[in-house]
Image (tube, helix red, strand yellow):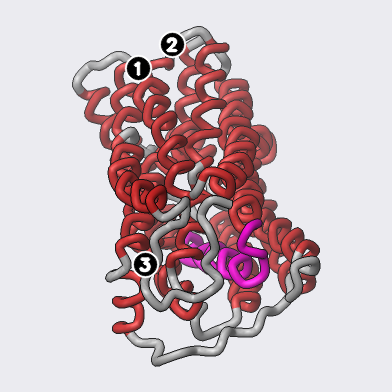
């Protein structure tokens, strides 16, 4: 595929993925409703959020390795269709904690066929000097998909019922499957050099110090990001309720505020962060962003009763920086791992990173329950809960610091293993 011919397929990819990812935070915004209807505790709600991420993790690991052997387009299209069917099933069959957990786990497994094939498509079609910003735009489309339900589910569910709202989400996801099947081009698999066995991945990824550090930093990033994403809507609703808002108004406006922080701010962060990684280098850009997000995690929960304009302002900054480093990790892995093992490298990255996405929401819910049982004020409860997420940026900065030092000594390029492929370009953009 030539340099000038990738744009239309990339736009179709982003649109199809946007539609197919509508399920991402749909349960999060339903927590205030289902807490009452199903009798859920904060810990149980956190377990359901984490169960969805565990489902993602299981399929991500399998799908990534399949990408070194199968074309990505059929995987994406079928996954989107099955996600839509899964959300229709959730609308019809979820009635309590057990059934809700089982069905969200199932949908999480099905969603796992979407993200990695899209990253592999970008690696195969986008010129190296545009991969950071292209990955940023792609991540922005995903975060907009995560954010949109935070508003429209909160607005529609009290009026038409949460089951009908979830069924509508399923229909959107089926439409995403059609877009990807119709408009995203098929890409031939690269010629394999050597056997596709465990030893190849050990050499190309696990014995590659640059790849290992990228994976560890990505894990810290996901701990913070998905803990924040999973609980920002309940935080906003609880804060507005404490300020005197009626239940339905708090749900709608809390969903809107959360959607703005996750979607609008996150999209700005993803695009800006991708561009920054092309200009400054992957490790340097990510470390700068992680330093700011660490501060946001440390202070955000304690703004529960602060002036609304301050809470909203910090939430927007939080939404920007919590996601802005994401393109750096995907683009960096594309550069330090040979093309023959890139799918498996993404799988190993997800195995580590998405374990954190499953644990963080549940851990945050547990902290809320423990702080509440200890008699802490709401601001202290949320402060301790969100403060736990600051551990992620700390891990990321520690992992990336040696990588950045070696990149600086290497004229801005990420250090790569001997024998790496020519597709890996300068880290300086």
* Picture disc at residue 305: 2
- Going 63% across and 29% down the picture, which residue do you hit? 256
Which circle's residue, 2 or 3, is located before the other in the chain? 2
Q: Are marks 1 and 3 in contact (CB under 8 Å)?
A: no
Residue under numbered circle 3:
348
Q: For residue 345, which quarter of the picture?
A: bottom left
Label 1 element class: helix
Residue 161 can be seen, yes or no: no
Residue 107 % position (x, y): 50, 61
Residue 414 in percent (x, y) is at: 43, 57
Counting every numbered tag in the picture gives: 3
Residue ID for mark 1:
378
> Which image quarter holds the N terminus?
bottom right
Q: Mark 1, residues whose alpha carbon is within 10 Å: few (<14), some, or many (≥20)?
A: many
Real-space CA distance between mark 2 and mark 3, rounded to the nearest whole angstrom? 41 Å
- Pick the front one: 426 or 234: 426
Magenta-tinted stretch: 107-130
- Check if residue 129 falls in the magenta segment: yes
Q: Tell which circle, 2 or 1, labels the residue nearer the N-terminal end.
A: 2
Is 317 included in the stretch rendered in magenta?
no
Secondary structure of the residue carrying tag 2 is loop
Task: Report the residue at 37% width, 31% height from top.
Answer: 294
* Circles 2, 1 touching at the beta carbon (< 8 Å): yes
Residue sticking out furthest to the top:
307
What numbered label is drawn on residue 322?
Answer: none
- State the image coordinates of residue 116 (x, y, percent, origin top left): 53, 66
Main secondary structure along the magenta-highlighted residues: helix
Let me know if residue 193 appears in the view. yes
94 sits left or right of 79 in the view: left
Q: Residue at x 41, y 78 (%)?
A: 419
23 and 95: which is toward the camera: 23
Q: Nearer the viewer, residue 277 or 376?
A: 277
């Amino acid at each position: 595929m030539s340099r000038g011919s990738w744009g239309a397929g990339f736009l179709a990819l982003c649109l199809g993925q946007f539609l197919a990812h509508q399920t991402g935070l749909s349960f999060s915004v339903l927590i205030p409703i289902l807490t009452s209807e199903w009798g859920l505790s904060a810990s149980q709600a956190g377990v359901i959020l984490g169960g969805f991420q565990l489902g993602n993790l299981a399929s991500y690991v399998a799908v990534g390795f399949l990408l070194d052997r199968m074309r990505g387009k059929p995987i994406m299209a079928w996954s989107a269709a099955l996600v839509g069917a899964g959300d229709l099933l959730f609308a019809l069959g979820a009635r309590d904690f057990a059934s809700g957990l089982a069905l969200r786990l199932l949908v999480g497994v099905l969603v796992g066929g979407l993200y990695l094939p899209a990253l592999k498509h970008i690696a195969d079609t986008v010129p190296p000097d545009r991969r950071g910003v292209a990955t940023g735009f792609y991540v922005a489309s995903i975060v907009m998909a995560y954010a949109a339900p935070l508003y429209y589910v909160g607005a529609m569910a009290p009026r038409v019922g949460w089951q009908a709202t979830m069924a509508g989400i399923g229909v959107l996801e089926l439409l995403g499957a059609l877009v990807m099947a119709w408009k995203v081009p098929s890409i031939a698999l690269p010629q394999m050099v050597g056997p596709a066995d465990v030893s190849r991945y050990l050499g190309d990824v696990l014995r590659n110090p640059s790849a290992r550090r990228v994976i560890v930093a990505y894990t810290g990033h996901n701990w913070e990001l998905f803990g924040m994403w999973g609980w920002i809507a309940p935080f906003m609703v609880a804060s507005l309720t404490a300020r005197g808002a009626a239940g339905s108004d708090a749900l709608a406006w809390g969903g809107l505020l959360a959607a703005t922080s996750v979607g609008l701010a996150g999209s700005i962060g993803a695009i800006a962060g991708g561009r920054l990684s092309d200009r400054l280098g992957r490790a340097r850009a990510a470390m700068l962003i992680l330093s700011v997000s660490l501060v946001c995690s440390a202070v955000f929960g304690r703004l529960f009763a602060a002036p609304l304009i301050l809470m909203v302002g910090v939430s927007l900054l939080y939404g920007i920086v919590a996601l802005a480093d994401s393109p750096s990790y995907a683009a960096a892995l594309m550069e330090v791992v040979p093309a023959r093992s890139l799918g498996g490298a993404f799988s190993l990255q997800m195995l580590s990173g998405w374990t954190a996405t499953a644990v963080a929401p549940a851990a945050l819910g547990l902290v809320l329950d423990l702080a509440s049982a200890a008699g802490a004020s709401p601001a202290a409860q949320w402060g301790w809960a969100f403060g736990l997420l600051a551990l992620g940026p700390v891990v990321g900065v520690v992992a990336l610091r040696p990588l950045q030092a070696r990149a600086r000594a290497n004229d801005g390029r990420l250090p790569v293993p001997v024998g790496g492929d020519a597709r890996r370009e300068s880290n300086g953009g």
